[in-house]
Image (cartoon, helix red, strand yellow):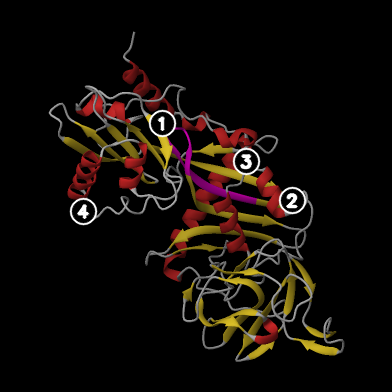
Amino acid sequence: MLHPFITFLLSFIFYTLDLDKFEINKSHASSILILPEKRPHLTNYYNYSLGTINDMILKEGGKTIGKIIKQNIKKNENLHLFLKRVGFENKLINAITLKIKSDYPSIKILRNIPTNHRIYYAIPKNNLGFGINFKISKFKDLYVWQSNSNEIKTKITKRPFNQINLLNKVEIKDNLYNSAIRNKLPKEIFSELIKTLGFSIDFQRELRKGDVFETLYSQKIDLITNEIIESNPIHYISANLKDNNLKFYKFTTKDGKSNFYDQDGKSSQKTLMKTPLNGARLSSGFGNRKHPILGFTKMHRGVDFAAPVGTPILAAGDGLIEYSGWNGAYGKYIRIKHNGTFKTAYAHLSKIYKKTGTRIKQGDIIGALGNTGRSTGPHLHYEILISGKQVNPLRIKLPSGKNVPKNELEDFYKQQQIINRKIFAMRNKIKNNEFANLKNLKNN
């Protein structure tokens, strides 16, 4: 009978060589099973995390520990307070924290452990030693234990993971957000999709039932827990609308900057997003209207989007916050200067998250929708100003971002062909809107 570790290693090698055989049904995407059911014991992988602190002690040597307990960090707790709360003695706590600081002087996790962060530990009692381990980042763990000579040992290790690519197709049944949720599209991928397509699509007016969005993205799977560590990055985004078909490919130029470009190498980015929030409806357009409060006809120099109070408001473009605060009838108000020509303004906010003078990036959350100032209901009043004059945000033609440099177009087209081949192969594997996975894009 093979040793359990050899069995796992052979299974791992087989999985790595035969990844194309795996298909992930979208209805079970939240519980992807990549490895055999038993937790692997990577006892020969010196630099990698193991299943438990007990596994690390068995591998490195140390005092046998008792029952491993798991608890979460409470609000305003650091490692010292946590260990004291769960039953460690002060003298040992001081020795543990001093040893960690000595071995890893640059580590900040001791005082900045997030609330609800999970820690595994075994308390020393009788002739048993202690053990502690917890994540210090998505991809690293910290282990602390006691040697047979009562010396405190520490080790930082990397969590082993595998990267797969997923193709996700979302057909709109009611709205884009709900349809994406039903199709198990990760939130971070959804946000990137909105941010990328927000330059070219008015999400409040252009979407129809039956429109199709497709994304090709990577996921990192933790090989110990089989959990998704992160979904990132996106390689491809497409939108097949009634009157608008779009395809964008991720490409990194020689200066190290990554962006999305269409089939001809033109940037997906414009100077400003058409709509600086998601899930709203246009409630009032630009131009003359009878003011709902004042009662007489007045020029409306922006557009209004109705949505629930608290809806995040996004910066329509990179820039500097020129003003942030109360502004009379506008209520809580933010104005961003994007360059020497363009500014945007956001009024009637319930909350402001960015101060005057803050430099922000396109898509950053700057505030929350509200009903402050002279307003009859929750909405965002949004303005675009060109050389100080308000213009209609829905009709303005915005200049494009930087395109792929001419001397890099050949590389871009090669990358585009690789992605297209992968997508074609994956589509052939998809039946009844299932997910499909494929090897890393680099394997062409």
First along the sequence among labels 1 and 4: 1
Task: Report the residue at 24% width, 55% height from top.
Answer: 106
Residue type highlighted by circle 4 = Pro
Answer with left or right where residue 439 lies relative to residue 53: right
Count residues near mark 3 (Cα–Cα under 10 Å), then give few for <14, some for 14-19, many for 20+: some
Q: Which mark is residue 16?
A: 1
Q: Which one is nearer the viewer's eye here, 438 or 96?
A: 96
Identify residue for label 4. 105
Label 1 crowd bin: few (<14), some (14–19), many (20+), radius 10 Å: few
| Relative vertical location of residue 439 with respect to residue 333 in this rendering, above or below | above
Q: Amino acid at mark 1?
A: Thr
Residue that badge 3 annotates: 427
Q: Amino acid at mark 3?
A: Arg
Residue placed at 67% from the left, 86% from the top?
Answer: 328
- In the picture, which quadrant includes the N terminus? top left
| Mark 3 to mark 4 CA distance (whole Å) | 50 Å
Distance between the alpha carbons at the discs numbered 3 and 2: 19 Å
Labels 3 & 4 near each other (Cβ < 8 A): no
- The answer to which of 410 and 14 lies nearer the viewer is 14
Q: Is residue 218 magenta?
A: yes
What residue range appears in magenta? 214-229
**Element at badge 4?**
loop
Going from N to C along the chain, the mark reached first, 3 or 2, is 2
Check disc 2: other Cα within 10 Å, few if <14, some if 14-19, many if 20+.
some
Marks 1 and 4, Cα distance to the nearest angstrom? 37 Å
At 57% from the left and 75% from the top, the residue drawn is 400
Is residue 332 covered in magenta? no
Q: Residue furthest bottom?
A: 388
Which of the two labelled residues, at mark 2 and mark 1, occupies the earlier sequence position?
A: 1
Q: Main secondary structure of the magenta part?
A: strand
Q: Measure how far apart labels 4 and 2 are at the Cα level.
A: 51 Å
